[in-house]
Amino acid sequence: MARKMNISQLRAYVDSQLVANQFNGSFEAHELSMQKYLKLLREAAERFKFFELSQVSRSKNKKADAISKLAALTFSHFQKQVWVEELPHKSIDGSLIDAAIEEVQPNWMDPLIHYFCNNILPGDKKEARLVCERSPMYVIENDVLYRKSYLGPLMRCVGPAEAATIVEEVHSGSCALHSGYKTIAAKIMRMGYFWPTLYRDVAQIVKRCKSCQRHAPQNRNQDMI
């Protein structure tokens, strides 16, 4: 997230004395798994102009420690929602290589990319005006188009083919979320993806899904009438 926000100087805190001292060189990493984690951490630190990892006492880190354990605990009395990202694989196990998705051409991203890269607008005046109006909400980083968000990191823009794969994965794949279309769409954006018809595409999938309709909230007042 810090790299996507173009942050060049970062100071991080951890309550583990072992991790902090291994990174700073005071301790040596003897276990193979710790050596792999240490290597990944140092590679990530080199991407910043300044990076510092400091230890804080566990007594001063209670809130962060509690949030990190929410995935394994149940707090039914909490009224506020706390979003937890579950990591199915260890970062040291190596990254998974997905099959390349052949994207549909042309797609909705092309006018924005041409405008940013070549300063070329569509020939139609109405489409050209829309591109100019929407352009402040987008940015290109490393030849990839991103959508800016108000409170979160940049969201990578995807075409129709990749969008269909993402919706299918979140709805019925390993993520398996049978819920309302707004909840599924919000999860997709938290994962860092965006396309203009996101809500409409998810709504169509939910309407065709029997499990989603079975577990959908019921309007009890309407049933009483």
Image (spheres, rainbow, N blue to C red):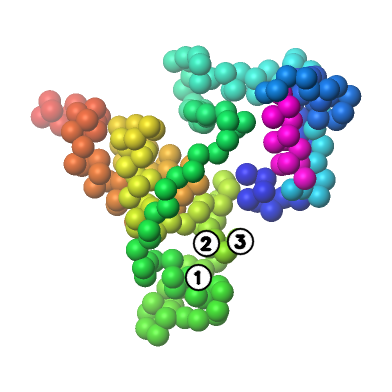
Query: How many residues crowd around disc 1 within 10 Å: few (fewer than 14), some, or many (20 or more)?
Result: many
Instruction: Confirm or deny contact between disc 2 and disc 1 (CB under 8 A).
Output: yes
* Residue 38 among magenta residues: yes
- Label 2, label 3: how many angstroms apart (C-alpha)? 8 Å
Instruction: Look at the numbered disc 2 and give the secondary structure of its residue.
Output: strand
Percent coordinates x, y for residue 70 in the rendering: 53, 20
* Residue 134 among magenta residues: no
Give the residue number, with chain letter if any, for mark 2: 145
Tell me which segment is drawn in magenta.
Answer: 34-46
Percent coordinates x, y for residue 137 in the rendering: 52, 62
Give the residue number, with chain letter if any, for mark 1: 113
Image height of 18 relative to 204, above or below: above
Percent coordinates x, y for residue 196 in the rendering: 38, 58
- Label 2, label 1: how many angstroms apart (C-alpha)? 7 Å
**Residue 142 disc label:** 3
Please identify the quarter of the rendering in which residue 63 is found: top right
Q: Which residue is found at the position 74% from the left and 16% from the top?
A: 58
Of mark 2 and mark 1, the one earlier in the sequence is: 1
Image height of 42 relative to 192, above or below: above
Outermost right residue = 26
Left or right relative to 30: residue 139: left
Query: Given the image, on which type of amino acid does mark 1 rest?
Result: Ile
Please identify the quarter of the rendering in which residue 185 is found: top left
Q: Which residue is found at the position 39% from the left and 33% from the top?
A: 175
Left or right relative to 46: residue 140: left
